[in-house]
Amino acid sequence: MKNLYINSAVSIALCACTSLSQAETRKTEDQDNENDMLLRVQALEQRIQEMDADQSEQQTSGLSPARRQVSDNGFNPAISVIIDGVYASYKSDPEEYRIPGYALGGEAELAPKGFSLGHSEITMSNNIDDKFFGQFTVAIAEHEGEVEVELEEAFFETLSLGHGFTIRGGRFYSALGYLNQQHPHAWDFQDAPLIYRGIFGNQYFDDGLRASYVTPTDVFLELGAEVFSGRKYPAGGEHSGAGSWTGFINSGGDIGTSHSWQAGVSYWAADSIEREYGGHDHDGTAEVPLFEGDSNIVGANLIYKWAPNGNYRDQNLKFQFEYFTRDDDGQLTLLDSNPLEESTLSSKQSGYYAQLRWKFLREWATAVRYDRLDSDNAGSDLDVLDEAGLISAGHTPVRASIMAEWIPSEFSRIRVQYNRDESYQVADDQVYVQYTFSIGAHGAHAY
Amino acid sequence: MHINPGMRRGFLLTVSLCACLLHSVSAQATLNVFACEPEWAALAKTIGGDRLTVYSATTAMQDPHHIQARPGLIAKARRADLLVCSGAELEVGWLPLLLRKSGNADVRPGQPGNFAAADYVKKYGVPEKLDRRLGDVHAEGNPHIHTSPENILMVAAALHQRITELDPDNTGYYRANYAVFEKNWRQSMQQWQQQAASLRGANIVTHHTYWTYLNEWAGMNVLATLEPVPGVSPSSSHLARLKKQLSQQDIKMIIHVAYVSDRPSQWLAEQTGAPVIALPATVDFQGGQTLSQWFDDVMQRLVGDL
């Protein structure tokens, strides 16, 4: 029994020695000095407590006006209103706009001639509780004389899963592209890249779920997947389960203090969809092309940014490149045609844009962009494909754009943009003057 | 059941040795600290020494209002055990997004892993009303609290408590480091106070409301700022007004932080004859500078030109 005690005592002492020795050696050798420090620490801790008491006193006595509001409104979400408008000038008729090899749908159309309201929207967001964040965005736009209200986002996101996991649910912009996740007012140009216009109808969102995971590594690595209802363009139709899904990987990091980058790849698939393109008028009757079949998209993007010393305020440079390719396989029908015109469709469409934005002064920036699309579409009846706009007839749609903008503050921007647009065989000169103002909550500085 | 005393002895020895090994492993594992600004990185490093791995999201040459939620920052925030930031909305443009993207629940606001320095000091410049016409106003007051040495002392005490709370195993180590820092800082403060005596009551012009806490501490009198309202660039009309307004005043100096353009300051210097002083905005943490070395530098620049 005695031996047992000795043994345990030895091992406990051993343990205490090894664990404490490191700390001990770092302590000051002088024991008196240490006691003196202990007293000082206690005195300071007491001062903190006094300070805390002071602060709560301040709040109750109303010295600090920002904290005086005590009402339910204090819990109102952060609200920001975007006021956006454009003046557009074209050489060609914007109603004639088309992209040979691409049947257009969604919101793929040009802003009307002259003055028009652009993409004004209201966003509300806040923490719901300690576990969820919520965001709600409605866009209000006028379309052919009618005011349309569109629910663009209504989602919740988890805050408390931890370990790098986040789940988002509701309606939201898909993470399948870099630009796709930004609201149009945050874009560097007034209009969407041609490839976004051609295959997403400007931008892709739907109702569903997203799960993402950020790895605990020095280099940023994010893996994620989304499932959607599949009702929204470029999918379509009713689906009992998930109508479309995506998978994405993003990576990125810093190079020194002045450079940073992000690169991503994504995949989108939707099976047995019914995709309706925007109709076109044909001798008084609207023939709407309908695609039924399977579709998938592969995307890749690269972002690079530079700012002197990493200080973005006064000067920075941003390079942005995205590439997408879409494969469609199925049946094409011209609805309301008489007799009903049908064809098989095997379509491959791909394109990219590259842009460079230079903020050369605190309040001024300029940017250039180049777009290019390709397509290779085949079917049993080429006349039907031609009617739908899917025959490129040897034309390669390209567009070159240049933009300059004045940014007096983080909340206002006035922009002038010129496009040399060769989307279709008739080259167009397009000029936009755009204003974008933000009222209310401070927007996030997303990468 | 009979247990052989020798077996028991061996078992106990093994258990205590295992516990011992585990203990030393956990004592060596360091906490990851993500500091939004270099001053808090330097402070955490001083208190935490080699028990903390400290990363600063910004440098002294970056405006902490205007940072983007870069992938590199998300990766760092993902692995953080403790976030040390100024708070008071200084990082409102990027930190909330960064935290949401990182998926790290331990450093959310309200968690022990989230430390906002501005919560521990009395703040100046709390706006009477909130209006964007007034520029970059922060509802909670001026967030550049690190420019007063008194504030550093208050934040250091609170940060020491927080680090100890998160890593109680190293309490003695942190306490010793903190006590040394506190003693040295108080000594330095006496010296800075002596230097600041010559600044008391001096009329100055600043570029931004960056040095409010320093001005209050040193008793300097800020006549005007070059920015018409915080965060808005000095306009020529505002500068012309300033020139007129200040023509009868005796200006000791014009101060700006190193990361903004010195052109508006130089212009006013030509008009008034007052010297321009560029002050390092904060500690050069990445370059190995400490808080007191930085403040020595600031004081020397201020008194050297008077």
Image (cartoon, coloured by chain):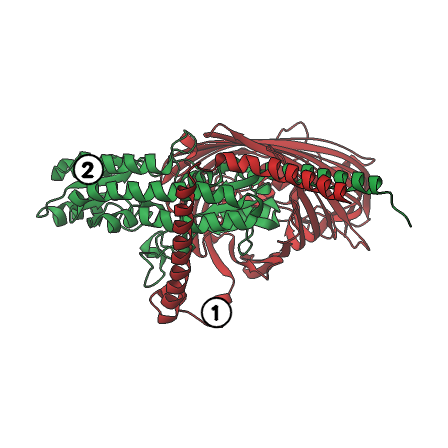
Question: In front here: A257 or A301?
Answer: A257
Seen from this angle, which residue lies furthest left?
Answer: B248
The part of the image, by quadrant, that contains residue A240 is bottom right
Picture coordinates of residue A411, whole percent (x, y): 41, 50
Q: Which residue is mark 2?
A: B303
Question: In front here: B59 or A394?
Answer: B59
Q: Which residue is mark 1?
A: A73
Residue drawn 16% across the image and 37% down it: B269
Up-down relation of residue B72 to residue B134 (above or below): above
Q: Colour of chain B?
A: green
Bin the neighbour count of mark 1 within 10 Å (Cα to Cα): few under 14, some 14-19, many 20 and up: few
Q: CA distance from mark 2 to mark 1?
A: 48 Å
Pointers 2 and 1 in contact (CB under 8 A)? no
Query: Which secondary structure, mark 2?
Result: helix
Residue A240 in the figure: left or right of residue B133: right
Q: Which chain is red?
A: A
Q: What amino acid is found at the position of numbered circle 2 in the picture?
A: Val
Picture coordinates of residue B13, whole percent (x, y): 75, 39
Q: What amino acid is found at the position of numbered circle 1 in the picture?
A: Asn
The part of the image, by quadrant, that contains residue B306 is top left
Q: Which chain is disc 2 placed on?
A: B
Residue drawn 55% across the image and 35% down it: A22
Residue drawn 22% across the image and 43% down it: B236
Quadrant including the N terminus of chain A: top right
